[in-house]
Image (tube, coloured by chain):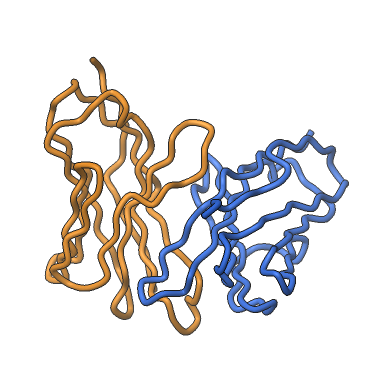
Chain colours: A blue, B orange
Amino acid sequence: KAGVTQTPRYLIKTRGQQVTLSCSPISGHRSVSWYQQTPGQGLQFLFEYFSETQRNKGNFPGRFSGRQFSNSRSEMNVSTLELGDSALYLCASSPRTDSYEQYFGPGTRLTVT
Amino acid sequence: GNSVTQMEGPVTLSEEAFLTINCTYTATGYPSLFWYVQYPGEGLQLLLKATKADDKGSNKGFEATYRKETTSFHLEKGSVQVSDSAVYFCALSEGGGSTLGRLYFGRGTQLTVWP
């Protein structure tokens, strides 16, 4: 099976712009979660989608949003970018088995200037 | 609440040395426990997992045992290789209720192995 794919891999934006990141889960996985990774804060949970519904949300401002499509692909959007949004954004998919392990994509490296 | 604490790095070892990375957790229920590894410029790879007390997860020579009495899940390897150099993350998932679909991670431990 192909792994989790994320596009684009690298992105440079300026403050105030918005950005959309895309994630394609492993075939058959219906749960997609998003995380932000920074050197200072580590790995922080953004949100999780299952069957096109947001099931859980982390402690991020409303500028961070997401959605999931009927084929389980997911997008996350960040509006009005700030310098502090520079980070590696990781998407993970899960088969929702009893252990709820997640499988991660390579990430999108976002740099805000 | 849920949280994971793992030993601060960096950890520097010579090839063939024994590795231990400590991880302890706090959880409100009965979590599943994981170790993930991140190589430079890549995402996280699931290294091993354990879903209940006394389970031992193992993969690629790495092992960790789910100890409910000490709320610990320490990662061990008997003989490290240069290729094991990476950042290691301990994580837990409760898989239900308000924590659905969320992994709680430790801060990560940087391991460097010298030849």
Could you tell whether A46 is left or right of B11 in the image? right
Please report the residue visible at 29 percent of the width from the left and 54 percent of the height from the top.
Answer: B48
In the displayed structure, does residue A55 sit left or right of residue B6? Answer: right
Residue drawn at x 19%, y 42% is B61
Which quarter of the rendered picture does the N terminus of chain B lie within? bottom left
Residue pushed farthest front?
A1
Instruction: Kindly give the residue lying farthest to the right in the view shown.
Output: A17
Q: Is residue B105 above or below residue B88?
A: below
- Quadrant in which residue B81 is drawn: top left
Residue B108 image offset from top left, x and y in percent: 38, 44
Give the position of the C terminus of chain B as an image quadrant.
Answer: top left
Q: Return the residue found at the far bottom.
A: B97
Question: Within the image, what quadrant is residue B5 found in?
Answer: bottom left
Give residue A77's quadrant in the image.
bottom right
Q: Is A38 or B51 nearer to us in this picture?
A: B51
Number of disc labels? 0
Q: Is residue B52 left or right of residue A63?
A: left
* Above/below status of A77 relative to A17: below
Q: Position of residue A73 (x, y in %)?
A: 69, 63
Of residue B84 and residue B59, the one placed in the foreground of this image is: B59
Question: What's the residue at 81%, 50% (across, down)?
Answer: A19
Measuring 58% from the left and 75% from the top, which residue is drawn there?
A56
Q: Residue furthest top?
A: B115
Q: Position of residue A24 (x, y in %)?
A: 66, 57
Image height check: is A73 above or below B76?
below
